Amino acid sequence: MTSTPAYAKQLRQRVLELCSRKRTSHIGGAFSVADILAVLYAEILDITADEPDAPGRDRLFFSKGHACTALYAMLELRGFFKGYDLLEQFTENGTYFTSHVNHNLPGVELSTGSLGHALGVSCGSALAGKRRRQPWSVFSILSDGELDEGSNWEAILFAAHHKLDNLVAVIDYNKIQSFGAVSEIMNLEPLADKFKAFNWEVEEVDGHALPALQDVFMRFKESRNGRPKCVIAHTVKGKGVSFMENDLAWHYRSPSEADVLKAISELEAV
């Protein structure tokens, strides 16, 4: 299997290609979540491209559907899109490669992009697994900005009440949302304390430190202590390309030809 660092590098390179060729946005958020996805798909999730709907598979719900290029690129790298041409079909009329995540594609559990819904669905999936006494785990990846949505806090209450210890929520905490800094739009802090007060087990981690991500994901996946789990992954919007990092503009901009050349040189140097 391809190594985790190689997955993270290839994922960012593919995202850059998709966003530049198809003139699409959200490259900053796709880069911030790249290492999280690389670790999950290389090291943690019990899934297979040959049987994407296997009843015993782990489930991953990708709530930040606007960063679809990251998930699409990861699934392509893992072989889920045999028979599809991601680059040619992405955003084209009549294809399933829409600009927000589409559940009609193999390996995608839920269409997302209307924020604040995937955690609730993840809770339902986790509850079903517990009631059926199934060993699989449910991971739910959320953006930080979407925690402004009240539906998430209802789901957080629900998960603790039902002791969904097979559920791991991962917050891509890059601290920039669509109109500015998270701290200025709707301050989430103290975020860890909020989850703890809702009776979740919480751990904060550098969202770009691959060994640390692997460690916490594996421990939380294996733990069945009656409490849902939350990983607050501190990330950098645009991570991996210096002129994109921590810049709100890359929530919206698509890279120019000159931007692509600069970005390629930085990504290849990793």
Image: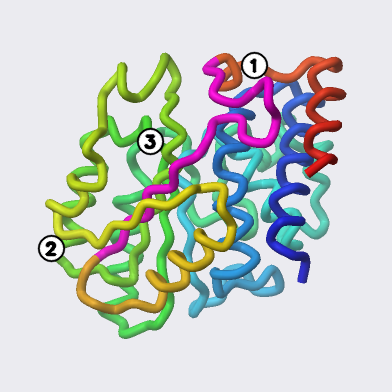
The local secondary structure at tag 2 comes to helix
Question: In the rendered image, which residue does mark 2 sit on?
Answer: 161
Quadrant (top left/top right/bottom left/bottom right) for the N terminus: bottom right
Q: Residue at x 77, y 48 (%)?
A: 10
List x then y, in percent, for residue 157: 15, 53
Q: Nearer the viewer, mark 2 or mark 3?
A: 3
Instruction: Give the crowd class for mark 2: few <14, some 14-19, many >=20 residues within 10 Å.
Output: some
Q: Earlier in the sequence, mark 2 or mark 3?
A: 3
Determine the image quadrant of residue 179: top left
Left-right relation of 179 to 95: left
Q: Is residue 81 above or below residue 28?
A: below
Left-right relation of 226 to 211: left
Residue closer to the observer: 84 or 2: 2
216 within the magenta span: no
Q: Which residues are magenta?
A: 228-248
List x then y, in percent, for residue 173: 42, 38
Determine the image quadrant of residue 15: top right
Quadrant (top left/top right/bottom left/bottom right) for the C terminus: top right
Question: In the rendered image, which residue does mark 3 sit on?
Answer: 144
Question: In the rendered image, which residue does mark 1 sit on?
Answer: 253
Dominant secondary structure (helix, strand or loop) of the stretch shown in magenta: loop
List x then y, in percent, for residue 209: 56, 53
Spatial CA distance of label 2 from label 1 is 41 Å
Q: Is residue 117 above or below residue 44?
A: above
Determine the image quadrant of residue 114: top left
